[in-house]
Protein backbone atom coordinates (compact mmCIF):
# COMPACT_ATOMS: atom_id res chain seq x y z
CA UNK A 1 0.00 0.00 0.00
CA UNK A 2 2.99 2.19 0.05
CA UNK A 3 4.21 2.72 -3.45
CA UNK A 4 5.89 6.14 -3.57
CA UNK A 5 9.68 6.11 -3.30
CA UNK A 6 10.88 9.57 -2.19
CA UNK A 7 14.49 10.59 -2.74
CA UNK A 8 15.27 13.72 -0.77
CA UNK A 9 18.25 15.14 -2.60
CA UNK A 10 19.97 14.96 -5.98
CA UNK A 11 23.44 13.46 -6.31
CA UNK A 12 24.92 16.91 -6.61
CA UNK A 13 23.41 18.25 -3.41
CA UNK A 14 23.36 15.37 -0.90
CA UNK A 15 26.95 15.90 0.15
CA UNK A 16 27.53 19.54 -0.74
CA UNK A 17 24.44 21.28 0.60
CA UNK A 18 24.12 19.77 4.06
CA UNK A 19 25.11 22.93 5.90
CA UNK A 20 22.88 25.17 3.79
CA UNK A 21 19.88 22.93 4.40
CA UNK A 22 20.57 22.84 8.12
CA UNK A 23 20.77 26.61 8.12
CA UNK A 24 17.14 26.75 7.02
CA UNK A 25 16.04 24.94 10.20
CA UNK A 26 16.79 25.70 13.80
CA UNK A 27 18.81 23.88 16.41
CA UNK A 28 17.04 22.22 19.34
CA UNK A 29 17.46 23.80 22.73
CA UNK A 30 18.83 21.82 25.67
CA UNK A 31 15.35 21.90 27.22
CA UNK A 32 13.84 20.39 24.07
CA UNK A 33 16.46 17.65 23.94
CA UNK A 34 15.80 16.81 27.59
CA UNK A 35 12.06 16.69 26.95
CA UNK A 36 12.48 14.39 23.97
CA UNK A 37 14.72 12.07 25.99
CA UNK A 38 12.15 11.95 28.80
CA UNK A 39 9.39 11.10 26.33
CA UNK A 40 11.57 8.35 24.86
CA UNK A 41 12.23 6.93 28.33
CA UNK A 42 8.50 6.88 29.05
CA UNK A 43 7.86 5.10 25.74
CA UNK A 44 10.52 2.51 26.59
CA UNK A 45 9.00 1.85 30.01
CA UNK A 46 5.53 1.51 28.49
CA UNK A 47 6.81 -0.93 25.87
CA UNK A 48 8.62 -3.07 28.41
CA UNK A 49 5.74 -3.19 30.88
CA UNK A 50 2.80 -3.67 28.49
CA UNK A 51 2.28 -7.31 27.48
CA UNK A 52 1.19 -6.43 23.95
CA UNK A 53 3.68 -3.64 23.28
CA UNK A 54 6.56 -5.69 24.72
CA UNK A 55 6.70 -7.87 21.60
CA UNK A 56 7.47 -4.79 19.51
CA UNK A 57 10.56 -3.78 21.50
CA UNK A 58 12.05 -7.06 22.69
CA UNK A 59 15.62 -7.95 21.78
CA UNK A 60 15.53 -10.70 19.14
CA UNK A 61 19.13 -10.47 18.01
CA UNK A 62 21.35 -13.51 17.95
CA UNK A 63 24.58 -13.42 19.91
CA UNK A 64 26.45 -13.37 16.61
CA UNK A 65 24.53 -10.24 15.55
CA UNK A 66 25.32 -8.54 18.84
CA UNK A 67 29.02 -9.42 18.55
CA UNK A 68 29.27 -8.26 14.96
CA UNK A 69 27.69 -4.87 15.62
CA UNK A 70 29.78 -4.33 18.77
CA UNK A 71 32.92 -5.09 16.77
CA UNK A 72 31.86 -2.60 14.09
CA UNK A 73 31.13 0.12 16.66
CA UNK A 74 34.46 -0.47 18.44
CA UNK A 75 36.35 -0.11 15.17
CA UNK A 76 34.61 3.15 14.25
CA UNK A 77 34.96 4.49 17.80
CA UNK A 78 38.65 5.01 17.05
CA UNK A 79 37.62 7.68 14.52
CA UNK A 80 34.13 8.78 15.59
CA UNK A 81 33.85 8.07 19.33
CA UNK A 82 30.61 10.04 19.72
CA UNK A 83 28.89 8.99 16.50
CA UNK A 84 29.91 5.31 16.47
CA UNK A 85 27.32 4.20 19.09
CA UNK A 86 24.56 5.39 16.74
CA UNK A 87 25.78 3.23 13.86
CA UNK A 88 23.73 0.17 13.06
CA UNK A 89 20.45 -1.09 11.62
CA UNK A 90 17.71 0.15 13.94
CA UNK A 91 14.28 -1.38 13.44
CA UNK A 92 10.88 -0.11 14.55
CA UNK A 93 7.31 -0.96 13.66
CA UNK A 94 7.37 -1.39 9.86
CA UNK A 95 10.14 1.18 9.59
CA UNK A 96 13.84 1.47 10.17
CA UNK A 97 16.84 3.77 10.44
CA UNK A 98 20.09 2.49 8.94
CA UNK A 99 22.87 4.70 10.28
CA UNK A 100 26.04 4.28 8.23
CA UNK A 101 29.46 5.87 8.71
CA UNK A 102 30.78 8.44 6.26
CA UNK A 103 34.21 9.27 4.88
CA UNK A 104 33.61 12.85 6.04
CA UNK A 105 34.70 13.41 9.61
CA UNK A 106 31.84 14.15 11.99
CA UNK A 107 29.07 12.99 9.67
CA UNK A 108 26.87 9.89 9.31
CA UNK A 109 24.49 8.74 6.57
CA UNK A 110 20.93 7.78 7.52
CA UNK A 111 18.78 5.64 5.23
CA UNK A 112 15.20 6.17 6.36
CA UNK A 113 13.05 3.12 5.58
CA UNK A 114 9.28 3.43 5.69
CA UNK A 115 7.71 0.12 4.68
CA UNK A 116 8.96 -0.50 1.17
CA UNK A 117 10.35 2.97 0.50
CA UNK A 118 13.61 4.69 1.37
CA UNK A 119 15.18 8.15 1.68
CA UNK A 120 18.80 9.18 2.23
CA UNK A 121 19.74 11.84 4.80
CA UNK A 122 23.05 12.88 6.28
CA UNK A 123 23.53 14.01 9.86
CA UNK A 124 25.99 15.62 12.28
CA UNK A 125 26.32 15.46 16.05
CA UNK A 126 24.80 18.32 18.07
CA UNK A 127 24.64 18.23 21.89
CA UNK A 128 24.63 14.44 21.93
CA UNK A 129 21.94 13.98 19.27
CA UNK A 130 22.17 13.52 15.51
CA UNK A 131 20.77 16.47 13.61
CA UNK A 132 19.80 15.46 10.07
CA UNK A 133 19.98 17.66 7.01
CA UNK A 134 16.18 17.74 6.83
CA UNK A 135 16.04 19.22 10.34
CA UNK A 136 15.05 15.96 12.05
CA UNK A 137 16.71 14.55 15.15
CA UNK A 138 17.87 11.10 16.29
CA UNK A 139 18.70 10.45 19.95
CA UNK A 140 19.73 7.36 21.94
CA UNK A 141 18.81 5.85 25.27
CA UNK A 142 20.78 2.61 25.66
CA UNK A 143 19.47 0.12 23.12
CA UNK A 144 16.69 2.42 21.95
CA UNK A 145 16.63 5.17 19.35
CA UNK A 146 14.12 8.02 19.17
CA UNK A 147 13.27 10.23 16.21
CA UNK A 148 11.77 13.72 16.08
CA UNK A 149 10.76 16.27 13.47
CA UNK A 150 10.32 20.02 13.60
CA UNK A 151 6.60 20.69 13.18
CA UNK A 152 5.19 24.21 13.38
CA UNK A 153 8.28 25.40 15.21
CA UNK A 154 8.28 22.59 17.79
CA UNK A 155 10.31 19.40 17.92
CA UNK A 156 7.95 16.42 18.32
CA UNK A 157 8.60 12.68 18.35
CA UNK A 158 7.10 11.14 15.24
CA UNK A 159 7.11 7.52 16.49
CA UNK A 160 5.53 6.26 19.69
CA UNK A 161 7.25 2.87 19.34
CA UNK A 162 11.02 3.48 19.47
CA UNK A 163 13.60 1.93 17.19
CA UNK A 164 15.53 -0.60 19.18
CA UNK A 165 18.43 -3.07 19.56
CA UNK A 166 20.54 -2.15 16.56
CA UNK A 167 21.65 -5.02 14.36
CA UNK A 168 24.77 -5.09 12.18
CA UNK A 169 24.58 -2.89 9.13
CA UNK A 170 23.74 -4.79 5.98
CA UNK A 171 25.65 -4.28 2.76
CA UNK A 172 23.82 -1.67 0.74
CA UNK A 173 22.55 -4.27 -1.76
CA UNK A 174 20.73 -6.22 0.96
CA UNK A 175 19.27 -3.07 2.47
CA UNK A 176 18.01 -1.98 -0.95
CA UNK A 177 16.42 -5.41 -1.42
CA UNK A 178 14.17 -4.68 1.56
CA UNK A 179 12.68 -1.65 -0.26
CA UNK A 180 10.04 -3.74 -1.99
CA UNK A 181 8.12 -0.77 -3.41
CA UNK A 182 11.18 0.71 -5.12
CA UNK A 183 11.96 0.01 -8.77
CA UNK A 184 15.48 -1.06 -9.84
CA UNK A 185 16.17 2.43 -11.22
CA UNK A 186 15.09 4.03 -7.95
CA UNK A 187 17.30 1.66 -5.94
CA UNK A 188 20.17 2.41 -8.26
CA UNK A 189 19.62 6.14 -7.76
CA UNK A 190 19.73 5.70 -4.00
CA UNK A 191 22.92 3.65 -4.33
CA UNK A 192 24.49 6.46 -6.35
CA UNK A 193 23.42 9.02 -3.77
CA UNK A 194 24.89 6.81 -1.05
CA UNK A 195 28.21 6.77 -2.86
CA UNK A 196 28.13 10.49 -3.74
CA UNK A 197 27.51 11.40 -0.10
CA UNK A 198 30.64 9.49 0.93
CA UNK A 199 28.72 6.83 2.85
CA UNK A 200 30.37 3.50 3.57
CA UNK A 201 29.69 0.09 5.11
CA UNK A 202 33.34 -0.82 5.49
CA UNK A 203 35.66 -1.10 8.47
CA UNK A 204 38.41 -2.90 6.59
CA UNK A 205 39.84 0.34 5.17
CA UNK A 206 39.35 2.45 8.28
CA UNK A 207 41.98 5.17 8.52
CA UNK A 208 41.81 8.33 10.61
CA UNK A 209 43.47 10.37 7.87
CA UNK A 210 41.53 8.99 4.93
CA UNK A 211 38.29 7.13 5.55
CA UNK A 212 37.41 5.65 2.17
CA UNK A 213 34.71 3.35 0.87
CA UNK A 214 36.11 0.14 -0.56
CA UNK A 215 32.89 -1.77 -0.08
CA UNK A 216 30.63 -0.89 -2.98
CA UNK A 217 27.85 -3.40 -2.54
CA UNK A 218 26.46 -3.05 -6.07
CA UNK A 219 29.92 -3.73 -7.50
CA UNK A 220 30.35 -6.62 -5.06
CA UNK A 221 27.20 -8.34 -6.29
CA UNK A 222 28.25 -7.92 -9.92
CA UNK A 223 31.74 -9.28 -9.22
CA UNK A 224 30.34 -12.31 -7.38
CA UNK A 225 27.78 -13.09 -10.09
CA UNK A 226 30.48 -12.91 -12.76
CA UNK A 227 32.40 -15.66 -10.96
CA UNK A 228 29.48 -18.07 -11.37
CA UNK A 229 28.14 -16.85 -14.69
CA UNK A 230 26.66 -19.69 -16.69
CA UNK A 231 26.51 -22.05 -13.70
CA UNK A 232 22.74 -21.85 -13.36
CA UNK A 233 19.95 -19.85 -11.77
CA UNK A 234 21.14 -17.85 -8.78
CA UNK A 235 18.65 -18.15 -5.92
CA UNK A 236 19.93 -15.68 -3.33
CA UNK A 237 23.07 -13.81 -2.27
CA UNK A 238 24.24 -12.71 1.17
CA UNK A 239 27.31 -10.52 1.76
CA UNK A 240 28.66 -10.11 5.30
CA UNK A 241 31.87 -8.15 5.77
CA UNK A 242 34.43 -9.78 3.44
CA UNK A 243 32.48 -13.02 2.94
CA UNK A 244 29.54 -13.98 0.77
CA UNK A 245 27.43 -16.99 -0.05
CA UNK A 246 24.92 -17.77 -2.79
CA UNK A 247 22.71 -20.63 -3.85
CA UNK A 248 22.32 -21.68 -7.48
CA UNK A 249 20.33 -24.23 -9.45
CA UNK A 250 20.71 -25.89 -12.83
CA UNK A 251 17.96 -28.30 -13.79
CA UNK A 252 17.49 -30.68 -10.86
CA UNK A 253 20.91 -29.95 -9.42
CA UNK A 254 22.45 -27.07 -7.53
CA UNK A 255 24.52 -26.07 -4.56
CA UNK A 256 26.05 -23.25 -2.54
CA UNK A 257 29.18 -21.22 -3.26
CA UNK A 258 31.14 -19.27 -0.63
CA UNK A 259 33.40 -16.33 -1.45
CA UNK A 260 36.06 -14.28 0.33
CA UNK A 261 37.26 -10.80 -0.58
CA UNK A 262 40.97 -10.12 -0.24
CA UNK A 263 42.65 -6.88 -1.39
CA UNK A 264 39.37 -5.81 -2.97
CA UNK A 265 38.94 -8.95 -5.10
CA UNK A 266 36.38 -11.71 -4.63
CA UNK A 267 37.43 -15.36 -4.92
CA UNK A 268 35.61 -18.67 -4.49
CA UNK A 269 36.73 -20.55 -1.37
CA UNK A 270 34.10 -23.32 -1.35
CA UNK A 271 31.71 -24.96 -3.80
CA UNK A 272 31.44 -25.01 -7.54
CA UNK A 273 29.46 -26.53 -10.36
CA UNK A 274 29.65 -30.33 -10.20
CA UNK A 275 31.54 -30.04 -6.92
CA UNK A 276 30.55 -30.54 -3.30
CA UNK A 277 30.04 -27.65 -0.93
CA UNK A 278 29.96 -27.02 2.81
CA UNK A 279 26.67 -27.86 4.51
CA UNK A 280 27.55 -26.90 8.09
CA UNK A 281 29.27 -24.18 10.07
CA UNK A 282 32.38 -26.18 11.00
CA UNK A 283 33.11 -26.87 7.35
CA UNK A 284 33.06 -23.15 6.52
CA UNK A 285 35.17 -22.37 9.60
CA UNK A 286 37.75 -24.85 8.30
CA UNK A 287 37.78 -22.87 5.04
CA UNK A 288 38.73 -19.74 6.99
CA UNK A 289 35.30 -18.14 7.56
CA UNK A 290 34.88 -16.66 11.07
CA UNK A 291 32.37 -18.73 13.04
CA UNK A 292 29.88 -15.90 13.64
CA UNK A 293 29.94 -14.97 9.95
CA UNK A 294 29.58 -18.63 8.90
CA UNK A 295 26.54 -18.93 11.17
CA UNK A 296 24.88 -15.87 9.64
CA UNK A 297 25.62 -16.94 6.06
CA UNK A 298 24.10 -20.40 6.47
CA UNK A 299 21.15 -19.08 8.47
CA UNK A 300 20.44 -16.65 5.67
CA UNK A 301 20.30 -19.42 3.07
CA UNK A 302 18.26 -21.65 5.37
CA UNK A 303 15.56 -18.97 5.60
CA UNK A 304 15.86 -18.03 1.94
CA UNK A 305 12.77 -19.86 0.69
CA UNK A 306 10.51 -18.33 3.32
CA UNK A 307 11.90 -14.86 2.69
CA UNK A 308 11.62 -15.14 -1.09
CA UNK A 309 8.06 -16.47 -0.86
CA UNK A 310 7.10 -13.52 1.32
CA UNK A 311 8.73 -11.05 -1.08
CA UNK A 312 7.16 -12.43 -4.26
CA UNK A 313 3.74 -12.72 -2.61
CA UNK A 314 3.88 -9.07 -1.52
CA UNK A 315 4.89 -8.07 -5.05
CA UNK A 316 2.02 -10.06 -6.56
CA UNK A 317 -0.50 -8.65 -4.09
CA UNK A 318 0.42 -5.12 -5.13
CA UNK A 319 0.05 -5.98 -8.80
CA UNK A 320 -3.21 -7.84 -8.21
CA UNK A 321 -4.81 -4.51 -7.30
CA UNK A 322 -3.89 -3.17 -10.74
CA UNK A 323 -3.64 -6.17 -13.05
CA UNK A 324 -5.19 -9.17 -11.32
CA UNK A 325 -5.00 -11.51 -14.32
CA UNK A 326 -1.22 -11.58 -14.56
CA UNK A 327 -0.29 -11.38 -10.86
CA UNK A 328 -0.04 -15.17 -10.12
CA UNK A 329 2.50 -15.67 -12.93
CA UNK A 330 4.93 -12.94 -11.88
CA UNK A 331 8.39 -13.94 -10.73
CA UNK A 332 11.77 -15.47 -11.53
CA UNK A 333 11.15 -19.20 -12.09
CA UNK A 334 13.74 -21.99 -12.24
CA UNK A 335 13.38 -24.56 -15.04
CA UNK A 336 13.81 -28.10 -13.79
CA UNK A 337 13.71 -29.49 -17.34
CA UNK A 338 17.13 -28.03 -18.21
CA UNK A 339 19.12 -29.20 -20.20
CA UNK A 340 16.31 -30.89 -22.16
CA UNK A 341 15.12 -27.34 -22.75
CA UNK A 342 17.75 -24.64 -23.01
CA UNK A 343 16.30 -22.12 -20.54
CA UNK A 344 17.84 -22.19 -17.07
CA UNK A 345 15.27 -19.64 -15.88
CA UNK A 346 12.16 -17.97 -17.23
CA UNK A 347 10.96 -14.68 -15.75
CA UNK A 348 7.48 -13.23 -16.13
CA UNK A 349 7.44 -9.42 -15.89
CA UNK A 350 4.34 -7.23 -15.58
CA UNK A 351 3.20 -5.03 -18.43
CA UNK A 352 1.10 -1.90 -18.73
CA UNK A 353 -1.28 -3.90 -20.94
CA UNK A 354 -4.00 -5.62 -18.93
CA UNK A 355 -3.43 -9.30 -19.75
CA UNK A 356 0.05 -9.13 -21.23
CA UNK A 357 3.38 -10.25 -19.75
CA UNK A 358 6.98 -10.00 -20.85
CA UNK A 359 8.68 -13.40 -20.86
CA UNK A 360 12.46 -13.47 -20.44
CA UNK A 361 14.29 -16.73 -21.00
CA UNK A 362 17.91 -17.10 -19.90
CA UNK A 363 20.08 -19.96 -21.14
CA UNK A 364 23.80 -20.57 -20.78
CA UNK A 365 24.64 -18.71 -23.99
CA UNK A 366 21.54 -16.81 -24.97
CA UNK A 367 18.53 -14.83 -23.74
CA UNK A 368 15.29 -13.64 -25.28
CA UNK A 369 12.30 -11.41 -24.59
CA UNK A 370 8.87 -12.56 -25.78
CA UNK A 371 5.26 -11.55 -25.19
CA UNK A 372 2.86 -13.70 -23.22
CA UNK A 373 -0.94 -13.35 -23.24
CA UNK A 374 -2.75 -14.58 -20.13
CA UNK A 375 -6.16 -16.21 -20.11
CA UNK A 376 -7.20 -17.75 -16.80
CA UNK A 377 -4.45 -20.15 -15.72
CA UNK A 378 -2.87 -20.27 -19.18
CA UNK A 379 -0.27 -18.07 -20.77
CA UNK A 380 0.27 -18.22 -24.52
CA UNK A 381 3.81 -17.47 -25.72
CA UNK A 382 3.91 -17.51 -29.52
CA UNK A 383 2.79 -21.09 -30.36
CA UNK A 384 3.42 -22.46 -26.87
CA UNK A 385 0.89 -22.59 -24.01
CA UNK A 386 2.01 -22.92 -20.39
CA UNK A 387 -0.34 -23.59 -17.49
CA UNK A 388 -0.06 -22.42 -13.90
CA UNK A 389 -0.77 -25.02 -11.20
CA UNK A 390 -1.34 -23.47 -7.76
CA UNK A 391 -1.43 -24.72 -4.18
CA UNK A 392 -0.08 -28.17 -4.99
CA UNK A 393 0.49 -29.89 -1.64
CA UNK A 394 3.62 -31.74 -2.78
CA UNK A 395 5.31 -29.26 -5.06
CA UNK A 396 3.86 -25.81 -4.39
CA UNK A 397 3.10 -23.59 -7.38
CA UNK A 398 4.59 -24.63 -10.70
CA UNK A 399 4.17 -23.87 -14.41
CA UNK A 400 4.26 -26.56 -17.09
CA UNK A 401 2.95 -27.44 -20.54
CA UNK A 402 0.93 -30.41 -21.79
CA UNK A 403 4.09 -32.26 -22.85
CA UNK A 404 5.96 -31.29 -19.68
CA UNK A 405 8.72 -29.83 -21.81
CA UNK A 406 8.93 -27.07 -19.22
CA UNK A 407 8.65 -27.46 -15.46
CA UNK A 408 9.08 -24.10 -13.74
CA UNK A 409 9.33 -24.07 -9.93
CA UNK A 410 10.39 -22.00 -6.90
CA UNK A 411 9.42 -18.49 -8.06
CA UNK A 412 11.28 -15.60 -6.43
CA UNK A 413 11.34 -11.84 -6.85
CA UNK A 414 12.32 -10.38 -10.19
CA UNK A 415 15.91 -9.37 -10.82
CA UNK A 416 18.03 -8.26 -13.77
CA UNK A 417 21.25 -9.95 -12.64
CA UNK A 418 22.03 -11.58 -15.98
CA UNK A 419 20.11 -9.34 -18.38
CA UNK A 420 22.29 -7.94 -21.14
CA UNK A 421 21.84 -4.44 -22.53
CA UNK A 422 19.66 -5.63 -25.41
CA UNK A 423 17.30 -7.51 -23.06
CA UNK A 424 16.89 -4.49 -20.80
CA UNK A 425 16.08 -2.29 -23.78
CA UNK A 426 13.53 -4.80 -25.11
CA UNK A 427 11.86 -4.81 -21.70
CA UNK A 428 11.53 -1.04 -21.80
CA UNK A 429 10.31 -1.06 -25.41
CA UNK A 430 7.64 -3.62 -24.53
CA UNK A 431 6.35 -1.47 -21.65
CA UNK A 432 7.31 -4.03 -19.01
CA UNK A 433 8.40 -3.00 -15.54
CA UNK A 434 8.73 -4.24 -11.96
CA UNK A 435 7.48 -0.91 -10.57
CA UNK A 436 3.84 -0.74 -9.49
CA UNK A 437 3.98 3.05 -9.91
CA UNK A 438 4.11 2.90 -13.71
CA UNK A 439 0.72 1.27 -14.16
CA UNK A 440 -2.41 3.38 -14.17
CA UNK A 441 -5.50 1.18 -14.26
CA UNK A 442 -7.45 3.98 -15.96
CA UNK A 443 -5.07 3.79 -18.90
CA UNK A 444 -4.46 0.05 -19.15
CA UNK A 445 -5.22 -1.19 -22.62
CA UNK A 446 -6.12 -4.56 -23.97
CA UNK A 447 -4.80 -5.35 -27.41
CA UNK A 448 -6.43 -8.78 -27.47
CA UNK A 449 -10.19 -8.49 -27.21
CA UNK A 450 -10.70 -12.26 -27.14
CA UNK A 451 -8.69 -12.47 -23.92
CA UNK A 452 -10.21 -9.61 -21.96
CA UNK A 453 -9.55 -9.22 -18.25
CA UNK A 454 -12.47 -10.76 -16.32
CA UNK A 455 -14.75 -8.13 -14.85
CA UNK A 456 -17.15 -8.37 -11.95
CA UNK A 457 -20.63 -9.40 -13.08
CA UNK A 458 -23.10 -6.52 -12.98
CA UNK A 459 -25.54 -6.39 -10.13
CA UNK A 460 -28.33 -4.11 -9.03
CA UNK A 461 -27.03 -1.34 -6.79
CA UNK A 462 -28.99 1.18 -4.81
CA UNK A 463 -30.09 4.11 -6.92
CA UNK A 464 -29.12 6.40 -4.05
CA UNK A 465 -25.53 5.16 -3.96
CA UNK A 466 -23.18 7.64 -5.69
CA UNK A 467 -21.62 6.25 -8.87
CA UNK A 468 -18.17 6.40 -7.30
CA UNK A 469 -19.17 3.82 -4.67
CA UNK A 470 -21.31 1.50 -6.79
CA UNK A 471 -18.47 -0.91 -7.53
CA UNK A 472 -17.86 -1.27 -3.79
CA UNK A 473 -21.56 -1.97 -3.24
CA UNK A 474 -21.57 -4.56 -6.03
CA UNK A 475 -18.65 -6.40 -4.44
CA UNK A 476 -20.18 -6.27 -0.97
CA UNK A 477 -23.53 -7.54 -2.29
CA UNK A 478 -21.74 -10.49 -3.85
CA UNK A 479 -19.85 -11.27 -0.65
CA UNK A 480 -16.50 -10.65 -2.34
CA UNK A 481 -14.97 -9.36 0.85
CA UNK A 482 -11.33 -9.24 -0.23
CA UNK A 483 -12.10 -7.41 -3.47
CA UNK A 484 -14.33 -5.03 -1.51
CA UNK A 485 -11.50 -4.39 0.95
CA UNK A 486 -9.08 -3.58 -1.87
CA UNK A 487 -11.69 -1.35 -3.52
CA UNK A 488 -12.21 0.50 -0.24
CA UNK A 489 -8.51 1.33 -0.08
CA UNK A 490 -8.57 2.54 -3.69
CA UNK A 491 -11.51 4.79 -2.84
CA UNK A 492 -9.72 6.17 0.22
CA UNK A 493 -6.79 7.19 -1.98
CA UNK A 494 -9.13 8.60 -4.61
CA UNK A 495 -11.19 10.83 -2.32
CA UNK A 496 -7.99 12.24 -0.78
CA UNK A 497 -6.36 12.64 -4.21
CA UNK A 498 -3.46 10.39 -3.21
CA UNK A 499 -3.71 7.81 -6.00
CA UNK A 500 -0.33 8.73 -7.44
CA UNK A 501 1.45 8.60 -4.06
CA UNK A 502 -0.24 5.35 -3.06
CA UNK A 503 -0.48 6.27 0.61
CA UNK A 504 -2.21 8.77 2.90
CA UNK A 505 -0.45 11.25 5.13
CA UNK A 506 -1.32 12.17 8.68
CA UNK A 507 -3.00 15.31 7.35
CA UNK A 508 -5.08 13.24 4.92
CA UNK A 509 -6.50 11.24 7.81
CA UNK A 510 -7.05 14.34 9.92
CA UNK A 511 -9.07 15.94 7.10
CA UNK A 512 -10.60 12.83 5.53
CA UNK A 513 -13.92 13.79 3.84
CA UNK A 514 -16.65 12.87 6.33
CA UNK A 515 -19.41 12.24 3.80
CA UNK A 516 -17.39 9.78 1.72
CA UNK A 517 -16.15 7.98 4.83
CA UNK A 518 -19.70 7.62 6.09
CA UNK A 519 -20.93 6.24 2.75
CA UNK A 520 -18.25 3.53 2.75
CA UNK A 521 -18.96 2.74 6.39
CA UNK A 522 -22.71 2.43 5.80
CA UNK A 523 -22.18 0.06 2.86
CA UNK A 524 -19.95 -2.21 4.95
CA UNK A 525 -22.43 -2.15 7.83
CA UNK A 526 -25.40 -2.91 5.54
CA UNK A 527 -23.97 -5.92 3.72
CA UNK A 528 -22.17 -7.47 6.73
CA UNK A 529 -25.22 -7.13 8.98
CA UNK A 530 -23.32 -4.78 11.26
CA UNK A 531 -20.22 -6.97 11.65
CA UNK A 532 -17.78 -4.94 9.52
CA UNK A 533 -17.21 -1.22 9.07
CA UNK A 534 -15.14 1.73 10.25
CA UNK A 535 -17.73 2.59 12.89
CA UNK A 536 -17.53 -0.97 14.25
CA UNK A 537 -13.76 -0.56 14.59
CA UNK A 538 -14.30 2.83 16.20
CA UNK A 539 -16.62 1.26 18.79
CA UNK A 540 -13.98 -1.39 19.59
CA UNK A 541 -11.36 1.37 19.80
CA UNK A 542 -13.43 3.17 22.43
CA UNK A 543 -14.11 -0.08 24.31
CA UNK A 544 -10.33 -0.50 24.59
CA UNK A 545 -9.93 2.96 26.09
CA UNK A 546 -8.73 4.59 22.91
CA UNK A 547 -8.69 8.32 22.45
CA UNK A 548 -8.91 10.35 19.27
CA UNK A 549 -8.64 14.10 19.12
CA UNK A 550 -7.62 14.33 15.50
CA UNK A 551 -4.09 15.43 16.41
CA UNK A 552 -2.10 12.59 17.94
CA UNK A 553 -1.53 8.87 17.45
CA UNK A 554 -2.53 6.35 20.10
CA UNK A 555 -0.30 3.36 19.44
CA UNK A 556 -1.03 1.81 22.80
CA UNK A 557 -4.68 1.31 21.88
CA UNK A 558 -3.73 0.36 18.32
CA UNK A 559 -1.71 -2.60 19.64
CA UNK A 560 -4.79 -3.78 21.52
CA UNK A 561 -7.01 -3.24 18.49
CA UNK A 562 -4.94 -5.41 16.14
CA UNK A 563 -5.28 -8.31 18.58
CA UNK A 564 -9.02 -7.80 19.09
CA UNK A 565 -9.98 -7.63 15.39
CA UNK A 566 -7.62 -10.43 14.34
CA UNK A 567 -4.96 -8.57 12.38
CA UNK A 568 -2.33 -10.10 14.66
CA UNK A 569 -2.15 -13.59 16.15
CA UNK A 570 0.25 -15.15 18.62
CA UNK A 571 2.18 -11.87 18.80
CA UNK A 572 2.81 -12.01 15.05
CA UNK A 573 1.38 -9.61 12.46
CA UNK A 574 -0.54 -11.39 9.73
CA UNK A 575 0.28 -10.99 6.07
CA UNK A 576 -2.57 -9.67 3.98
CA UNK A 577 -3.30 -13.11 2.47
CA UNK A 578 -3.75 -14.52 5.98
CA UNK A 579 -6.61 -12.18 6.81
CA UNK A 580 -10.07 -13.76 6.95
CA UNK A 581 -12.17 -12.50 4.06
CA UNK A 582 -15.48 -13.99 5.13
CA UNK A 583 -18.18 -13.44 7.71
CA UNK A 584 -16.32 -15.94 9.92
CA UNK A 585 -13.82 -13.18 10.67
CA UNK A 586 -13.82 -11.44 14.07
CA UNK A 587 -16.03 -8.41 14.52
CA UNK A 588 -14.35 -5.34 12.99
CA UNK A 589 -11.86 -7.41 10.96
CA UNK A 590 -12.81 -5.52 7.79
CA UNK A 591 -12.21 -3.17 6.14
CA UNK A 592 -8.46 -3.02 6.62
CA UNK A 593 -7.63 -0.08 4.35
CA UNK A 594 -4.14 0.90 5.45
CA UNK A 595 -5.19 0.52 9.07
CA UNK A 596 -3.93 -3.02 9.61
CA UNK A 597 -0.42 -1.99 8.58
CA UNK A 598 -0.22 0.22 11.64
CA UNK A 599 0.45 3.26 9.49
CA UNK A 600 -3.19 4.15 8.93
CA UNK A 601 -3.29 6.62 11.85
CA UNK A 602 -6.31 4.70 13.12
CA UNK A 603 -7.52 7.10 15.78
CA UNK A 604 -7.18 10.07 13.44
CA UNK A 605 -9.55 8.44 10.94
CA UNK A 606 -12.09 7.54 13.63
CA UNK A 607 -12.26 11.20 14.59
CA UNK A 608 -13.88 11.84 11.19
CA UNK A 609 -16.86 9.55 11.86
Image: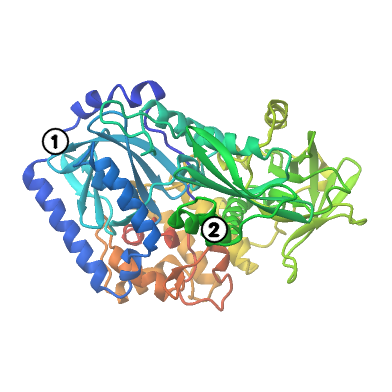
Residue 81 x, y percent position in the rendering = 20, 41
Residue 164 x, y percent position in the rendering = 30, 57
Q: Nearer the viewer, residue 282 or 462?
A: 282
Disc 2 crowd rating (10 Å Cα; few below 14, some 14-19, many 20+) is many
Quadrant for the C terminus, please.
bottom left
The quarter of the picture where residue 349 lies is top right
Left or right of residue 183: residue 105 = left
Helix, strand, or loop for circle 2? Answer: helix
Residue 558: which numbered mark, if any?
Answer: none
Query: Is residue 61 visible in this depiction of the protein?
Result: no
Q: Are marks 2 and 1 in contact (CB under 8 Å)?
A: no
Left or right of residue 133: residue 528 = right
Which residue is the site of mark 1? 27
Q: Residue at x 54, y 68 (%)?
A: 579
Which residue is the site of mark 2? 298
Q: Nearer the viewer, mark 2 or mark 1?
A: 2
Q: Residue at x 28, y 57 (%)?
A: 162
Residue 142 x, y percent position in the rendering = 21, 57
Count of numbered marks: 2
Helix, strand, or loop for circle 1? Answer: loop
Disc 1 crowd rating (10 Å Cα; few below 14, some 14-19, many 20+) is some
Residue furthest toward the left? 31
Q: Earlier in the sequence, mark 2 or mark 1?
A: 1
Using the image, determine if residue 79 lies above or below residue 18.
below
Q: Residue at x 48, y 77 (%)?
A: 586
Q: How is the image coloured?
A: rainbow
The quarter of the picture where residue 403 lies is bottom right
Amino acid sequence: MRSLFILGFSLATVAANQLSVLAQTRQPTNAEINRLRQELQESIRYGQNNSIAASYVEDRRTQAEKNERESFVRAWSKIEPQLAPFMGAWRGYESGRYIYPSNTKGRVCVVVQEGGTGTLNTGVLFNGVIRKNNGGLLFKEGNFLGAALLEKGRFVRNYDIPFHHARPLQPLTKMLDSLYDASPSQKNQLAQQFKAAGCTTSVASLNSQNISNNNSSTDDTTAILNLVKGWGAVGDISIINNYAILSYFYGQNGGNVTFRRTTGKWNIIDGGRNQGNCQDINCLVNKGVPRDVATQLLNYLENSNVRQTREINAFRQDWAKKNKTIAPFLGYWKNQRWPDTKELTISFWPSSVANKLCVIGISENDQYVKTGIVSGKDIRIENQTLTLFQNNDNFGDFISDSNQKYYLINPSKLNTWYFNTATKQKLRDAGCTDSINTLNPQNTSNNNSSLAVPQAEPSIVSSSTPVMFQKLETLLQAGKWKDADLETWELMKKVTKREKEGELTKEDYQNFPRKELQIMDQLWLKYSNGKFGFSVQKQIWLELGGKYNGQHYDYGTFLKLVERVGWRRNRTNLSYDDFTFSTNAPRGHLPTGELASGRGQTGLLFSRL
